[in-house]
Image (tube, rainbow, N blue to C red):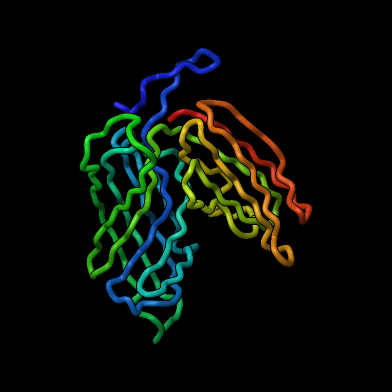
Amino acid sequence: MRNWQPSVTCQSLCKCYPAQALQVYGFQIQYEDKTAAGQADISGFFAIRDYYDKRRISIFHRESENPSRINFAAGAGEVNVVCPLRGILYGNLVFEYDLAIKSTHGRGGMPQLGCCMEGAALYEVGEKIVPYSGSHKIIHAEIPVDGGKRMYLKFVRFNKAIEAQVTIEPSIGSEFCLVARMGDIADEIQLFNGKFVAAPDQETQFVLVVPFDEILELKFTNPSTTGKSPEKIYTYYSFYHGRSRQTVKLASGLKICMEIKWSRM
């Protein structure tokens, strides 16, 4: 059974159910050797299964021919996660991963960065789940890996959550950065950063977990402009269902079509 808050009646007289759900905020790989530093390429996948829908929810996936770049410092490197295709419901989770990390320094560089990590791990809540209880909560999950390595995941649990599907339609060659912020959480989530070339690994649709009746803030900047790039901030209040569409106009003349679709989980 889903971890739902009792139903409420919308203005359209339909019954809707928020849920306790998790938004991924960070994914970090740490080495026991704190001198490990430099750049490395990472490929493979990291996925999560929740207790309701046992299918994989991917937060990272790159083919070996198209890896993602990580910058390591003091033995730690931050992995750029992707937004999953749906929200993650709060409860016991299973982590599955098969990752390959390769140093970009070549022979004689930083061999300690190269490794392969494959396996699965169970994350147990360890507390009684009470629907719609307490405030937003930051959760850290630690996954030990052979060879003195560890992976860390950072989540925020929203107790009364819905989904926001954000779709952008940039033109080829557009260069911009898009970040999101939800509720009263100060941390931002990077959705897009760089030049849009319609590559297979460039996401244009993002599913975010947003607390009901609170804000979703989307911030656009154009790093290609000279000097300090002005920001365009769009703020939305979350609903159980609905749709909003508008055109974003940046100072450089760049136009990006954006659509937000709200739905319960």
Q: Residue at x 66, y 55 (%)?
A: 221
Depicted 129 relative to depicted 151: above or below: above
Quadrant including the C terminus: top left
**Would residue 236 appear left or right of 211 to someone viewing this image?**
right
Please state the horizontal and vertical placement of residue 49, each as a whole percent of the image: 32, 42
Front residue of this view, candidates 57 and 242: 242
Q: Residue at x 50, y 62 (%)?
A: 66
**Could one spot residue 75 in this view of the protein?**
yes
Depicted 109 relative to depicted 42: above or below: below
Q: Residue at x 53, y 28 (%)?
A: 239
**Could one spot residue 173 in this view of the protein?**
no
Please state the horizontal and vertical placement of residue 58, each as a whole percent of the image: 40, 47
Quadrant including the N terminus: top left
Please state the horizontal and vertical placement of residue 179, each as a whole percent of the image: 56, 51
Residue located farthest toward the right when viewing the structure as drawn: 253
Front residue of this view, candidates 96 and 80: 80
Please state the horizontal and vertical placement of residue 16, each as a whole percent of the image: 45, 21
Residue located farthest toward the bottom when viewing the structure as drawn: 108
Q: Residue at x 68, y 49 (%)?
A: 232
Depicted 193 relative to depicted 20: above or below: below
- Total marks placed: 0
Residue located farthest toward the top when viewing the structure as drawn: 13
